[in-house]
Amino acid sequence: MRPCPAGDVVLSLFSSQAAYSLRQAPEFEVDVVSTASRSCTFNIGARHLWVQITAGSLRVWSSDECAEGEASLVTELQRGVPTVVPIGWDGQISSQRCPGPGTDAPAGTYTAVASDSSSSSNALAFRMG
């Protein structure tokens, strides 16, 4: 089976909440949908599909930096049928060392975006604190 053409995969990002307390770990859901006419393969592994958190223009965290789970996980996509990938954030600002001691992100408004090497999802704003 062939890999999905880059322009034929749509990423959508969701969260069940618009606000979290500082003690909660935000959970996101990335829906991966193919618009290709035939079934195709797509890598949903932790090094290929990630969520990045920003505060304004400041990058706070990215799930691919300290990826947990399968680094590479190829799945079959069928036209219009979403594959759901859960990705959680522990509320820590990214550290240079993995794993390393993290710093808690302060209260504020953040934006999450899911990406792969060729496309990005909708931007999802949420509040911490």
Image (cartoon, rainbow, N blue to C red):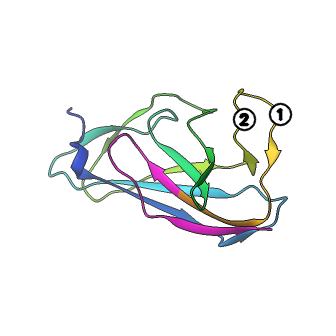
Identified at 48% across, 64% down, the residue is 123
Which numbered dot is residue 91?
none
105 or 83, which is in the foreground?
A: 105
Identify the secondary structure beneath mark 2.
Answer: loop
On-image quarter of the C terminus: bottom right
As drawn, 13 above or below 40? below
Left or right: 128 with respect to 63?
right
Identified at 71% across, 71% down, the residue is 19
Identified at 72% across, 35% down, the residue is 95
Identify the secondary structure beneath mark 1.
Answer: loop
Residue extending furthest toward the bottom: 18
Identified at 28% across, 59% down, the residue is 80
User: Is the C-beta separation of discs 2 and 1 under 8 Å?
Assistant: yes
On-image quarter of the N terminus: top left
Total labels: the figure holds 2
Give the quadrant of residue 4: top left
Residue extending furthest toward the left: 37
- Amino acid marked by disc 2: Ser
Q: Which residue is mark 2?
A: 95
Image location (x, y in percent) of residue 40: 24, 40
81 or 100, which is in the foreground?
A: 100
As drawn, 32 above or below 15? above
- Amino acid marked by disc 1: Pro
Image location (x, y in percent) of residue 33: 33, 55
Residue 81: say if magenta. no
- Which tag, 2 or 1, sits closer to the chain's start? 2
Q: Which residue is mark 1?
A: 101
Classify mark 2: residues with Cα within 10 Å, few (<14), some (14-19) or many (20+): some
6 or 111, which is in the foreground?
A: 111
Measure the alpha-carbon separation of dots 2 and 1: 7 Å
The magenta span reads 113-129
Image location (x, y in percent) of residue 103: 82, 44
